[in-house]
Image (spheres, grey):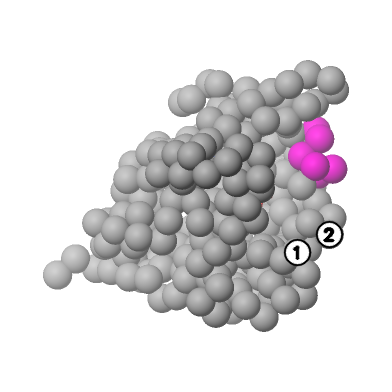
Amino acid sequence: MNRKLAKYYDNLAKEYNKLYYGSKLKWMREIENIVMENEIKRDYLVLDIGCGTGEQLQKLNNNPAIGLDISIEMAKIAHSKTNKFVVVGDAENLPFKSKTFDCVISFFGALNHVQLNRALKEIRRVLKDDGILIFTVANVYDIRWILKTLRRKGIKSTKKAVKNKKGEIVKFINGKRIKVKTKFYDLNDIEKALDKYNFHIKYTFGTNITNSFVDKIIYKSFLKNFGCYIGVVAAKKNKS
Ligand SMILES: C[S@@+](CC[C@H](N)C(=O)[O-])C[C@H]1O[C@@H](n2cnc3c(N)ncnc32)[C@H](O)[C@@H]1O
């Protein structure tokens, strides 16, 4: 398990809801809700990877659902908020039997911290044969991030950041600076990885371009490719 990553999120846990809630994420959450409501049937057993403080587990109130998070502090909050079973573990090494879940979800970037191939292999293993995978990951072609980087650092640095698809998240918690490394993906990376692990993409969607109602309208249009997050709904293919 990546201890540095776990520690970063342990430190963030108590402040997470203050930092990441409110109008900034309103439409992203709306879109997540639409996708979950459309795709997750009431009797599905769901695994939420990187459940954080339980945002999605809470919405899955009527489903049998289990959370998993690398951070024990996040897991504690998710459990106390939702009363769901929450496991401390790593997306790259899932502590579940093969073919257990009808659906695996992972919203808002847990998969930006993993070796995607390893995580997808594990997700495929724990999904039932007709299981579905729904996730969002940070998008390297996030137009607002690109414009902000251009303004702050100029063309050369922006080109380099986009090319390397690597970055850092920096936060100040109780006056202390904490940071963690993260990766970014483009749609092509995601399509290739899903294909390699025998997933069929049902559709992709985007989140957060304008932080307004407009996001809800464009989440499936071509503009989705320039949102903060790439969203995917995929089904496990049975090997022929
Ligand atoms: C930005 S938060 C998202 C939480 C929640 N899904 C949401 O939408 O608010 C990312 C979460 O993923 C967890 N995480 C990061 N890397 C992980 C890994 N390799 N395995 C499991 N959880 C991980 C973090 O601890 C954190 O709680």
The residue sitting at 84% across, 43% down in the picture is 18
Residue bearing the label numbered 2: 23
* Quarter-of-image position of residue 78: top right
Residue 73 in picture, x, y percent from top left: 70, 30
Residue bearing the label numbered 1: 211
**Could you tell which of marks 2 and 1 lies nearer the N-terminus?**
2
The residue sitting at 24% across, 68% down in the picture is 238
* Quarter-of-image position of residue 17: top right
Along the line of sight, the residue nearer the viewer: 170 or 69: 170
Along the line of sight, the residue nearer the viewer: 226 or 90: 226
Residue 13 in picture, x, y percent from top left: 74, 34
Q: Is residue 16 magenta?
A: yes
Q: Is residue 139 left or right of residue 126?
A: right
Bounds of the magenta span? 14-19
Q: CA distance from mark 2 to mark 1?
A: 7 Å
Q: Are marks 2 and 1 in contact (CB under 8 Å)?
A: yes
Query: Neighbour class for label 2 at 10 Å: few (<14), some, many (≥20)?
Result: few
Quadrant occupied by the C terminus? bottom left
Q: Secondary structure at mark 2?
A: helix
